[in-house]
Each structure stands twice: as structure tokens, then as C-alpha cells.
Amino acid sequence: MQGIEEVRSVLSYPKRIIITSHRNPDGDAIGSSLAVYHWLMEMGHQVMVAFPSEYPAIYNWMPGINDIKIHDLEDEEVDEFINSADVHVILDYNSLSRIDKMGDRLSDQQHFTILIDHHLYPDALGDFILSDTSASSTCELVYRFIKAFSSRPQISPKMADCLYTGIVTDTGSFQYSTSPALFRTIADLMDLGVDNHGLNHMIFNNLPEKSLRLLGHCLYNRMEILDEYNTGIIFLNKHDFQVFDIQRGDTEGIVNYLLKIKHVHMAAFFRQQPSIVKISFRSKGHFSVEEIAKNYFNGGGHRNAAGGYMKSGLAAALKKFKEVLPIYKEKLTKEVLI
Ligand code: 5GP
Ligand code: MN
């Protein structure tokens, strides 16, 4: 693995290391951060994991989760650590713009930077970069990195649980982005002690009642299917956020339901947040939502899963999306090969 000797030499003495991942961290962001956290701590480094914003409560069981710092809530403590750190590990994102104010703070520093990520178009951010857009998840890449780092890689059961969590969530429970290498990795993780059945239970059967009521509301009252464009939309307004007491992470996964409809090739999920409208896009087959997110909604991501935002009201965001659809009509309506 190119450049890994330098990483080996940097990590051969105790260092202060800041690990960061993206705003609204998901299972892969949290899993990769905690796996690297445990790995580095076991090597004797001083380590802090910091996210710009809070993680969903469904991950509260993950080993080490209570050690994570949230910049929105504890900026002084995080900034102080950033200022005195030697190494910065960037996981599951590839542009400092994804971590807001924390990005401004980090861009001023001279840290040795390690970037491990699977998103498109990485900024040239790292002294060491492992960026592979064909990988299922950052956790898959972290596993590859740790294996390459040492001929006798130390992967504790805690680390294995974290890596499994990122992989199972980012692949939609092994529905997409899979490969023979990924299943070999999963087999290795199970050899290391991963109880996949137990972890799946913790990850997927862990919702409060209100989440299912919210899903019902989205599917029954807030879903619009635009047959002409093979596109489905779900939106949630400010009132919905109050009525259903929606917290961070509570809307995760809802967008995917639209793709269960046979003729829906693109799904868009609009959430009216206090100052922006956040949008999640999903697609089937060759149709790229990454292009739509990047060109029209200040965002990006992957071909089949992307996100963006608009600093407008909800109605304006929905209107803009519907204006964009005719541009993609041909691509959307012709057969989308899986
Ligand atoms: P989600 O819809 O689950 O929040 O995000 C889906 C994918 O799009 C993820 O890979 C995420 O990193 C990417 N993504 C979501 N929001 C943004 C954004 O505002 N900017 C960029 N560049 N990517 C985003
Ligand atoms: Mn990921």
C-alpha cells in the first residue's frame, strides 16, 4: 500500500491524534472512527474522536461511543486538542467543507494527515491517502489499511464489531457495493469474534415507537410519486419535526423505501431544518444522483446515494427539484440496468 511506511514511522512513537468524521455521522463514520480509535489507543497513542454534530442514539451501544466529542457541544475541548495534535485521521469524508467550523480549525494546522474514504472526488487532503470509491465502506478500507500496516494486525473483538457495523449499514445489509473481497473481510471479522446476528439485532431492532409512526406518516401522508419521471419524493416540514419529536438520525433509511416501488428509479427525501432544507437522494442502476446533488444542491456523494442542501424554504427546494427533473427525463425513464 503506497506510503504506508511513512505512516508506520509516524506511529512508531506515541502521538496525539485527532480522528474526525463528517456531520450527521452514520454507522460507517462512527464504526470506522471507533475502530481506528481502539486500534491507536491499544498502540499507546493519545486519541480523540470528534464529530461536528451528534450521532444517532441507536448507536449508543457501540464500544467507545461515550468517548466521542461533539464539536457543536464541546468546541473548546476539541479545538484545544486539535491545536496540540500531531496527527489528523480523516475518515468517511474527503473535504474539510463537510465538517464546518471544525474544518476551518483543522485547515490551519500542520498535522500529519491520514485520509481513508470511499467517496468520489477527494480533495488532496492527506499525507497518506487511501481513497477507493469502489469500496463498500470506509470500514472495509480501514480493515484493509490495518492489515497492510502490520504483518500481524491487531484487531480486537471491539474493533471487529465497529468495522462490521460500518459495513452492514453502508451496504444496506449487504444489498449493494458488495464484492468477493468484502465477504472475505466479513468472514475474517466473524473469525475475530463478530456475532453478526447479535449485532444486526442491536443495529436494526433498536427503534423507539415514534420512529415507526414517523415512517408511517412519511409513506402515507408525505410521499409523492411522479410516474412521468420514475421518481419518488418524501418531504418533512417543520411541523412534522415538532409533532414527531424528530431527533438526529430518526429519519435515516426512510428515503430507501421509495426505491421499493418497482418503477421508481430515483428517490429524494427533503427535510426542512431550521436554516436549510437537507436532501437525501438515492437511485437504482446507472442513474447518478451524485450528479444531481453536485450540480443543483450544493452536495455530492456516490452514484446511487448522495445528499445536498438548499438555503431556501421547503417549497422552493421541492420546486427546484421538479424543475430539474425534465433535464434528466430520458435517463430516468429508459431502462435502468442494475
Ligand atoms: P445521506 O442521504 O445518507 O445523508 O447521504 C448519502 C451520501 O451522500 C453519503 O455518502 C454522504 O456522504 C453524501 N452526502 C450527504 N450530504 C452531503 C452533502 O451535503 N455534501 C456532500 N458532498 N455529500 C453529501
Ligand atoms: Mn461511508
Image (tube, rainbow, N blue to C red):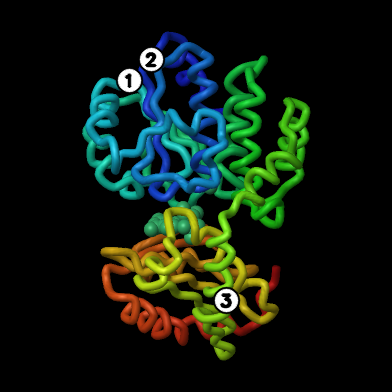
Label 1, label 2: how far apart the Cα atoms are:
6 Å
How many angstroms separate mark 2 from mark 3 (CA)?
Answer: 49 Å
Which residue is tagged 2? 15
For label 2, being within 8 Å of ligand 2 is answered no
Image position of 261 (left or right of 215): right
Q: Secondary structure at mark 2?
A: loop
Q: Where is residue 187 drawn, in percent x and y?
A: 77, 35
Figure check: 255 above or below 15: below
Task: Decide if residue 263 is on the left or right side of residue 113.
Answer: right
- The residue type indicated by label 2 comes to Lys
Q: Residues within 10 Å of mark 3 (few under 14, many from 20)?
A: some
Q: Position of residue 113 (x, y in %)?
A: 38, 29
Name the residue type under label 3. Answer: Leu
Give the structural element (helix, strand or loop) at label 1.
loop
Q: Residues within 10 Å of mark 2 (few under 14, many from 20)?
A: some
Question: On the rendered structure, is 149 left or right of 247?
Answer: right
| Residue under the point 70% across and 68% down | 338
- Disc 1 and disc 3 in contact, CB within 8 angstroms: no
* Image quarter hosting the N terminus: top right
Q: State which image quarter holds ligand 1.
A: bottom left
Residue at the spot of label 3: 219
> Does residue 31 sit above or below 284 in this rendering?
above
Give the number of the disc on residue 134: none
- The residue nearer to you, when weighing 53 against 282, is 53
Residue for badge 1: 86
* Residue located 52% across and 83% down the image: 224
